[in-house]
Amino acid sequence: MDRIECDRMFVAVIDTGSFAAAAARLGTSSGQASKLVSRLEANLGVQLIMRTTRALSLSEAGRAYYERVKTILEEFDALDASVRNASGAPSGRLRITAPISFGTTQLTPVLIQFATAFPDIQLDVSFSDRVVNLVDEGFDAAIRIGRPGDSSLIARKLCAARIVVVAASSYLNAHGIPSAPADLLHHDCIIDTNFRDPLTWRFRLGKEQPVVLVDVRGRVQFSNAEACVAAAEAGLGIARVPSFMAGARLRAKAVRPVLAEMEDEPHGLYAVYPPGRHLALKVRVLVDFLANAFRGQPQWDKGW
């Protein structure tokens, strides 16, 4: 197992491009990462990685070894997964990434339930609005909103993710209630820069009608939906945000829906994971658990 640990670290260093990144992927220190690779080189009697102050590069022997050992480790992991799946006992480290706002407000309670139900799984969760490369960065699964762009990943839809437009009564009483998307041109809009096109808001006048696009403007913008809802609640303008962030404030009447009858078609909430001949049982039980937790109408869309 010590040799496998060294091999895994060597592959991680090459895949990530640094000892620090490889150590972070495998949950250890940079010093330990360097020791493991040095131990591997000493065992083989050959230098695998050429080290300089600026970069790492493979030696000829290192390149040949990397190509072979990476395939061997993948086959070993597939065998390990198949045996563990047959045993019916999910275990091991499970690395997940999810968007910050959704992760902290909606996903965390579900993951706490999951961790309680599967005590042999070591849960490692990273919240980030960056689109993480699952394979290169060593993640087992990700939660993503909107159709996943990477076609190499397997995606399972968990539920709908609505995008709603909201504002406080104080703002609407002072500035008027928009009755059509074009009316937003005369309003202060709060911009959520996490959207792909944050200044272009989408509406649909009916199922058979084309999408209406409106280029809005506003003096306040955040790269966080929770902050946008808070700004709307404070009366700073009209915000367009995911309903999982606005739902609680809508139920509390802190904000009101705007142009609700023209809401765009919902996005999807997906669990995505890399393909493989043998899906690890820990990933399978996670995806099934999430699908069960979020099935039907999401809790955040009820009661408003």
Image: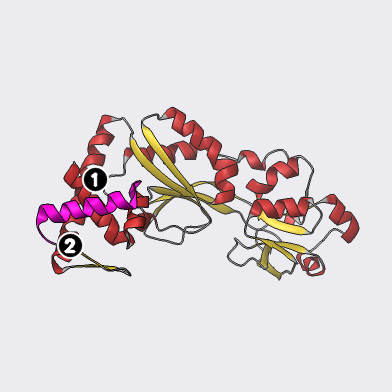
Callout 2: 10 Å neighbours few (<14), some, many (20+)?
Answer: many
- Drawn side of residue 160 relative to residue 202, left or right: left
- x and y percentages locating residue 79 in the rendered image: 20, 42
Q: Nearer the viewer, residue 56 or 177?
A: 56
**Disc assigned to residue 48:** 2
Q: Residue at x 31, y 68 (%)?
A: 53
SS at mark 2?
loop
Q: Which residue is mark 1?
A: 77
Q: Residue at x 27, y 69 (%)?
A: 52
- Drawn side of residue 26 relative to residue 224, left or right: left
Magenta residues: mostly which secondary structure?
A: helix
**Above or below for 284 versus 19:** above
Q: Is residue 136 visible?
A: yes
The stretch of residues the image draws in magenta is 26-46
**Above or below for 8 versus 295:** below
Q: Is residue 294 visible?
A: no
Q: For residue 183: magenta?
A: no
